[in-house]
Structures are given as structure tokens and as C-alpha cells.
Amino acid sequence: MCQLLGMNCNVPTDICFSFEGFSQRGGKTDEHGDGWGISFFEGKGCRTFMDINPSADSVVSNLVKRYPIKSLNVIAHIRKASVGEIKLENTHPFVRELWGEYWVFAHNGDLINFYPKLSGCYLPVGDTDSELAFCAIMETLKSGFSAKPDLSQLYALLCSQARRISGYGSFNFLISNGEFMFAHCSSDLHYLIRSHPFSEAQLKDLDMTVDFRTLTSENDRVAVIATQPLTVNEAWTKIAAGECCLFSEGKILAKSAASC
Amino acid sequence: MCQLLGMNCNVPTDICFSFEGFSQRGGKTDEHGDGWGISFFEGKGCRTFMDINPSADSVVSNLVKRYPIKSLNVIAHIRKASVGEIKLENTHPFVRELWGEYWVFAHNGDLINFYPKLSGCYLPVGDTDSELAFCAIMETLKSGFSAKPDLSQLYALLCSQARRISGYGSFNFLISNGEFMFAHCSSDLHYLIRSHPFSEAQLKDLDMTVDFRTLTSENDRVAVIATQPLTVNEAWTKIAAGECCLFSEGKILAKSAASC
């Protein structure tokens, strides 16, 4: 299994604090040491840092921890390999282009006997069930709409895809096009909204505290989504099994059972 | 205009020495300070480091210079913005997936009145003529072959695309699928093959020397391709205007006018 981390904000925000704690679980405070990756949207652009070394002890993850990249949407993943060897091509997040936008996806779980028939518009490069599921979702989106539909149509299609693919196993995932962040929970996924009045947060995996009062302005809103809560003194909400959440500008826009 | 750097080898090799010199041209020894990027193939996987800051003075480029990533195919680019603002989405190299492989592309030059009609299977995210040309090439490859053809067919189609798009302006470019490196020269592109017996090389842009005799074995072969030679004491070959080169395992497999 693996762990997921997502961030969705209304103003460009760096994820250094959350990633500092999260990355410890990649070989130090937890067993997810089979590679890691993180994708940052910056405007319409997107850059991904990844490595097959454990995130707790990687030259590249040390850069990500110390280099504050301001982003509205970030997806990170630490891997405990189940399907697919420890190789760069099996390292999440995966990225594809659709309707002239980059789409980023990361998954935690296992899909059993999942062999979707793909037309070829999106094909996996590696051999994980995760990238296969991502390609299947992307193909459904592309074949469903010749141009980008409105958000409610996108949400409905993502919910129905989450429900369909969940039939094959555990399918906790995050997907983002740089505008919104969609989350589906099969078993473990939590979120937290940080907004005014801000307070101090203490990491769970590291002796590290940050006082968000000194770093934020009144209108800032940040949603953090993680497999397991990252801080010990904040109120994380568990997303129910089978539930989908749509985050935009640091708020929950929609929340519903995957069967919507 | 911009500058290109490519590497194609028969054994996984790091590009630290060449990139150290090349990156100086991004704001120090030359004016290409409007962002930079570098893509490394590792197995079937591919990771890209990029930044909108000048490569001569970027936190991320400092990591790339010091972190030896072993790769068979690398493409790097430093940008002097002409078409498209200085934004991450306009930063080369660009990456897309085709036939279950990542394809990486970077371009130096300007295309005038180039408005190809794209079906939508690959669309640009940013607003450079370069990404548009890449999408046009990818669409032609995908529509030409439902599955990956043999290398000679690929080479012929890439040559014809290079010739066609060169009709719109200056089109120096590198493209790779992780197996081979294809180069087309409109104006400036040079290459060098390093093989046994190896010798010492002195960078042009920095007081730095490396003795490849101490770092290589007899069978190693490395092709380095760059807009302008990177070293002062090696014999670089200029690729003629209108010429295409196909590099594989550190050798030139084919070389021909783009009209082939």
C-alpha cells in the first residue's frame, strides 16, 4: 500500500511543512520507502519531482522540503510497492494532458482483475494497476466530452468512474487538473481545512511546529488531504468509504457517495 | 532563441559535466535566462526537472549539476523567450505519452504563421510554437501507426515532419522516446561522440576539466548534441542545415537530409 497527500488552496501556498512530515513515512516513521513523487501546478504548468529512493532520505526530497514552491494544487505519493516493481515508471503521480491541461493522479490501494480495454488514446508506461486506472479515467473523460465540460459534469463523471473502478478493489485516489482537486476514499483518506483564525500546528511524524498566524493573511484557505492525519493538534475529518470530495480554492465544493 | 543539449549513450551515464557548462549559458556566459528544463529517461520512466529561473543560478539546477542521474537519453533546454511568456507551461522539454512510451521534445528556433490543425489527441498546454510543433509531430506519429512501428519507419516519418515544419521557420529540435535520440538542425546543432580511447575534456563556459579515462570502460559510447560546442579541446561536428541525425547507443544510426 501507499500514502497520499494533496493540497488545494485559494492563494499559491508552499507545502514544505506538510511534506516534511509526510516524507518521514517513506522509510522512517512508516514503511512506504519504495519511491515517492510530488507534482506542483504553477499556473497551467506542472512539474513533478520523483525518485525511487525513500522520501525520508532522498537528495531530491530534501530539495522539495527546503524549496518553497507556491502552488494552488499539489499531489504527492509515497509508495509501498504491491503491483509493479520499484522503477521510475511505476512511481506516482502520473501525468497526462487532456483538453490542453495537465492532469495529475496518484492512487493508494490494489485493484484485482482490473483489465480495462483501452483504445490507445492513453496507455500506461509502467505496469501498475494505478496508472492503468488513471488511463481508463482519462479515456472516459476524453471520449465523454470533445471539449472541457463544466465542473458539475466533470464531477459527475469522476464520481461514476470512482464507483466503477472501486468495484475492483481499494481505490483511494487524488486527481487534479490544476483548478480543482478530486478525492475518492475506499478505506483511508482524511482532510483538514486551514482558514482564519489560523493557529499553530504540530507534525505527527517529526518534532516540528509551525505558527500559521505568522504566515497567512485573513482570506487564505488551504485544504490538506492525506491518507492519515499529518498533525496531532488539528481536527482532521475522515472521508467515508465510498465518498468523493471535490475541493476548489481551499473549500469543499461537493461531497457525495461515489454513486452520484 | 534558446539552446539545446542532448545525450544518447550505450550505458547509463550522468550528464553533470556537460550540464554544468551548458547551464552557465542560462544567464551567465549567455543570455538564455528565461527558464530551463532537463528530462532524464531511466528505464521506461522519465523525470523532468524545470524552473523559470535562470539555470546559472537556480536551486533546482544546482541539484541537477550535483546529483548524478544515470540515463541513456537526456534532453535539456535553456530558454530565451521569443514566443510565449516566461511561465512553467512554456518551459521545455515537453513530454507526452505515445504507444505506452514517454516522448520528450525540445526546440530552438521560431516558427512563423505555424497554425497546424490538431484533432485533439495532443494539445499544447502553454502558448509556444515549440509545444504546438511537438503536438503536431505526435499526432502525425499516432495517426500514422496504430502501434509502434520499426525504427526505420519512425525515422522516415520524423524526417518528413522535420522537413515540413522547417518550412515555417527555424526548427532545431531534439526528440527521444528513451530508446533513440532524433536531432534536426535548421541553423545550429553540433555533436560529439566520446568513445575509447577517452581523453580529458575542458569546458568552454567554466574553468572545469574532466578526465574521462578515469570514469569510463572500454565499451562506453556517449553522443553529446548541443547548439554550440560545450568543450574547447574536442572535435565537435556541425550538423548541416536541413540535416537529420538518429542516435542510438551512442552511435549515429542514420544521417540524412530532412527530405528523406
Image (cartoon, coloured by chain):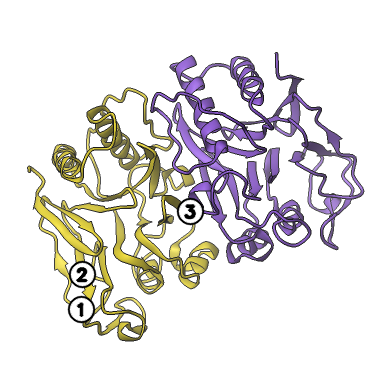
Chain colours: A purple, B yellow
Residue that badge 3 annotates: B52
Residue type, mark 1 in image: Glu
Tell whether label 2 touches label 1 (CB within 8 Å).
yes
Tell me the element at label 1: loop
Ranked by sequence position, the earlier of labels 1 and 2 is 2
Relative image position of residue A223 (x, y in whole percent) = 76, 37
Looking at the image, which residue sits at the far right?
Answer: A233
Give the residue drawn at x 17%, y 53%: B185
Q: Of discs 1 and 3, which sits in the foreground?
A: 1
Q: Of discs 2 and 3, which sits in the foreground?
A: 2
Tell me the element at label 3: loop
Residue that badge 1 annotates: B234
Residue type, mark 3 in image: Ile
What is the distance, in whole Å, between disc 1 and disc 3 at their CAs?
31 Å
Residue that badge 2 annotates: B192
Nearest the camera: B81 or B165? B165
Relative image position of residue A125 (x, y in whole percent) = 44, 42
The answer to whether residue B89 is above or below residue B59 is above
Give the chain letter at badge 1.
B
